[in-house]
Amino acid sequence: MSLFISYNREQKDFADRIESSARTVCPVMRDTNDIAPWGSIEEFMNRIRQADYAVLLISDEYLKSINCMYEACQLYKDVNWEYRTMYVVLGNADIYVYTVANHERYIRYWKDRKTVLEDQAKSLPVESIDSITSEIKRVSEILLMLGDFLKTIRDTNNTKPENTIDAIISFITTTPAPKETHLEDDSCEALSKTLKGDAFDNIFKEVTHSERLNLRNPHALRLFHLDVVNYGFSQKELLKFLRKNIGRYVYSRAKLEQFKLDDDVEGVRDEALRIMRQTGRPDEKGTGNELGEMLLYAFLEEKLDAPKLLSKVELSTGAKQYNSQCDSIHMHFVNNADGIAYYQMVFGTSSVIGDLKGAIDAAFEGVVKIENRGDDEVELVEHTFLNQNVPARDVDFIRSILIPSPDGNTTYDTAYGIFLGYSLGLEPGTRTALEYRAAVNKKMERDIQEYAKYIREKIDELGLSHRSFYFYVMPLTDAEKEKREIMQSIMEVSDNG
């Protein structure tokens, strides 16, 4: 049994008092004691997930500290984080935390901080912005969890500061610690992600919003956009990113490894492009050559942390005879609220068309086709993925998931990953360039406010509210035109491109 104290230095005296009392009943993890001289601060902060219990000293300074909020984000990755976490609301933080309308104070603070960092990154050479990129990623994670985090603190029956220390001792000595449920520690550990996503967060800017699907199982509804340049979305960095990942998209892990063994890494892209050209024309849906199919793969690997089993190119070549309705198939590791680990077979579908409602409808048509095939898609994985030249550990790993255990229980569920692209439909009007950039985020927020309920209604109509759905939404300036131009640019690139 152990206790982690997360606090801002302004609350050092209160942390001292907690530590002094808590050490009489359990080990205490705290920065002043557990970071060795010249040791890693980040490594220590990550240890909050190893502790059985955590106490967070919530103050105005805490909620504006990147290190404090980083620790909160790490804790948040545990499904059972709420059941082993205690809060002490100090100073004037109660004015802002206990009133929902005042939560905007912190959301606005982190949004502004992200904007400043992004502007700094744009003004510096690419090779010198690693630290800023890392900071942007941390701030993005904070923004994603902040609303739920503040809501949870507000909804918790927190004791008054003067009664807190006795309450903490009572809590950790009488409340059993939940089972460890660390979402990322063992995430598909036998399968590595294929995507080279180090520049992902520089290219795809996430837009925070308050809409929720409120499904019973894990789910996501996330918005992204490209850089806004001259009143439109810039394709420049997207094209570089997609070209860099062509080989990873087309080929299996084993094939990519073979290229390395043959000392022919430079040939990966050329050979991958040759295969894509053979499967169909640029922007031809169902071949792997459509923008949505490729971006779906990228978002599921990078943002869902779900390694690819088969991309659409692989499904339309090596598994063509199975007539798969999926745009990609991925494996995702999750924990449920009871701390039981299991896996999800994530079947992907995508749609990039002019309006968001049409994209939603088209994507759900794909979901229905996949759902109707039932076990055929899983059988496809068994016959295709496992018959590739796959490393033995990968084969054993996938078989252990797909094949029922002796007691007849399966260890995976079906989930859906969906990429939606649409035309934003925002005219410059009389806006300045800066005003237009701000309007992009507002328009996206309004769009998802309008259609989040519609998405949930579609899920309910199809009787799929028991499934997990992971949505990734990204507008373009002119979706129909640009998706074709982007794929033409990628597939028709010259040898020197």
Image (cartoon, rainbow, N blue to C red):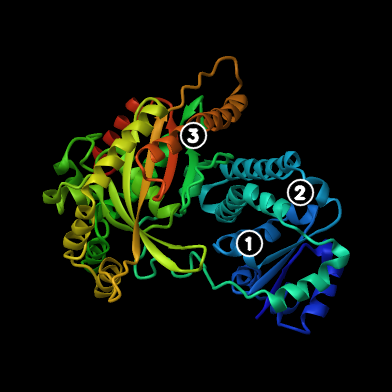
**Element on which disc 3 rests:** helix
Q: Are marks 1 and 3 in contact (CB under 8 Å)?
A: no
On the image, the x and y values in percent for residue 174 come to 70, 77
Residue that mark 3 sits on:
453
Give the mark toward the camera: 2 or 3: 3
**Element on which disc 1 rests:** helix
Q: Give the side of residue 331 with respect to residue 288, left or right.
A: right
Q: Earlier in the sequence, mark 1 or mark 2?
A: 1
Residue that mark 1 sits on:
82
Look at label 3 and name its amino acid.
Lys
Report if residue 37 is visible in the image. no
Residue furthest out toward the top: 430
Q: Are marks 1 and 2 in contact (CB under 8 Å)?
A: no
Name the quadrant containing residue 412. Answer: bottom left
Q: Give the side of residue 41 with respect to residue 125, left or right.
A: right
Q: Earlier in the sequence, mark 1 or mark 3?
A: 1
**Element on which disc 2 rests:** helix
Look at label 2 and name its amino acid.
Val
In the image, residue 156 sits, relative to residue 393, either above or below, namely above
Q: Earlier in the sequence, mark 2 or mark 3?
A: 2
Closer-to-camera residue (184/214): 214
Q: Give the side of residue 442 with respect to residue 471, left or right.
A: right
Q: Residues within 10 Å of mark 2 (few under 14, many from 20)?
A: many
